[in-house]
Image: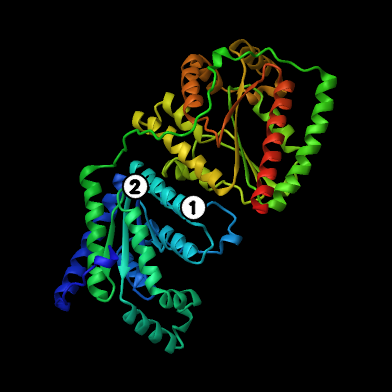
Amino acid sequence: MLKDYERKKPENKEAINAEIKQLRELLLGQQQLLRDAKLPVIVLIEGWAAAGKGTLIKEMISEIDPRFYRVVSPVIVPETEERYPFLYQYAKAIPENGKITFLDSGWMESVVRKYLRHEITKEEYNRRVRQVNEFERQLRDGGYLVLKIFLHIEKDLQFERIQALSDNPATEWRVTEEDLWQHREYKRFIQAYDAFMDKTDDILPWHILDGSRRKAAVRDGMKLLVQRIQHGLDNGRYVGEPFKEDFPLKDMPKLADVDLSPTIDDEEYKKELKKLQERLSELHNIIYRKKIPVILCYEGWDAAGKGGNIRRVAYPLDPRGFDVHPIASPLPHELNRQYLWRFWTRLPRTGHICIFDRTWYGRVMVERLEGFCSEKDWKRAYNEINEFERQLTDWGAVVIKFWIHIDRDTQLARFNERQNTPEKQWKITEEDWRNREKWFQYEVAVDEMLQKTSTKNAPWYIIESNDKKYARIRTLKIIVKALEKACEDHFERMMN
């Protein structure tokens, strides 16, 4: 790529300016069509320091309504200070339908700099390349128009531009130690950029622009953007085909085959609850010090006892170190983004615990059965979710997923109790009764979900909850055991 790049011959400036003017007019006309078609656009601008990334973005946005675009400059912090997964800040920045996000540098710059700084290993570098390909494919398959541009300049020209910026009191602040380091290590950087682009060009291609010719680079960048948007307008929103990667899966029983008879007597329940909550409190302190993030996922039948189960888990935790996220129907700004966005934005920092009361699995349950997404969307989601959870565990998170399970008769009894008890009536809705009518359809969907997404790194646990007290104790035991193992594994990694 960069090593084979050939600079183009100089062009007439007046002709280039005329082309830029025409492209601005085209972009001005496209923005309303883009909103009407509800097509989201991401423009990633990577390249050398002083290559003109800021100028290119400035020219691209000059004729766009400022209410419908956003420019994001992701921060590259040292790996030792990072508190969220690698892709967190990029996933958080994806735009709503009909809007555009411009990224002033992004995932390539982050990976390359940290690798050359020896902040991440070769193994971690390869993981992040894989994650980038997964992320880009999920965006593409979810209907995002993604344009990736690299602005290229030679080392001598970079030096001239850096020197000019440094000599001017008004612009010297724009030259950082990181820029100077990149210039000194130009040869290593060009090799690293080349390698990264070679590995991430198949799903969404890279476009290399000649940054030595500022006006031509603006013209070429705007032309790429106009063409990308027009292609989307002409062909409609792309919907990716389902695909399957071989994840290591755990064998899961069908819900109908689960024995729901286990119970626990009151005396043993009180004793076990006290012991497990005390241990969980101790482990919370340990995982905070070791900066281990924990993500607990709750799904289950209506009236299965998720709320009471979550309360017993949350009670011993330090309230400053955990969050509970009750997930309802997506709000308009959530519905207008890729479905995993609202979960990316709710992830915990390292050392914190996040409890999801309902999760991203709505994609393959309620959205599937109620027709809120296409068949391609929910069939593709199994693999996308496995990728998402692998990215979380690659980051170091403990991910545990619970299906809180009851039988149909128990659900009916609990529904009737809620209906007939004034202080509990708020817990029962018409939607609960409608969902109950689709019990067997949901059972088929849940069985498929458990079979396809219970991975070794993020397993499902079916919690027998006809006896709510038994379910709470079993859940606490699973969490305590998993956190103890995570602390032991962390200790072994530190010793090695």
Residue flagged by tag 2: what amino acid is it? Tyr
Label 2: element kind: loop
Check if mark 2's residue and mark 1's residue have beta carbons within 8 Å: no
Query: Considering only vertical position in the picture, is 3 above or below 240?
Result: below
Tell me which residue sits at (35%, 68%) in the image: 190
- Where is mark 2, residue-wise? 144
Tell me which residue sits at (39%, 64%) in the image: 192
Q: Quadrant of residue 226?
A: bottom left
Using the numbered discs, state the Cα–Cα distance from disc 2 to disc 1 in whole angstroms: 29 Å
Residue flagged by tag 1: what amino acid is it? Glu
Observer-nearest of 427 and 209 = 209
Observer-nearest of 118 and 18 = 118
Crowdedness near tag 1: few (<14), some (14–19) or many (≥20) residues, C-alpha within 10 Å: few
Q: Quadrant of residue 283?
A: top right
Mark positioned earlier in the residue sequence (2 or 1): 1
Tell me which residue sits at (49%, 14%) in the image: 440
Tell me if 355 is positioned left or right of 212 in this view.
Answer: right
Query: Considering only vertical position in the picture, is 193 above or below 94?
Result: below
Tell which residue pokes out farthest to the front in this image.
496
**Residue 479: % across, % down:** 68, 34
Observer-nearest of 171 and 251 = 251
Give the label on residue 123, or none: 1
**Residue 102: % across, % down:** 38, 60
Quadrant of the snapshot with the N terminus: bottom left
Tell me if 232 is positioned left or right of 434 in this view.
Answer: left
Tell me if 39 is positioned left or right of 10 in this view.
Answer: right
Query: Considering only vertical position in the picture, is 206 above or below 267?
Result: below
Tell me if 435 is positioned left or right of 24 in this view.
Answer: right
**Residue 186: % across, % down:** 39, 74
Tell me which residue sits at (35%, 53%) in the image: 199
Tell which residue pokes out farthest to the top in this image.
409
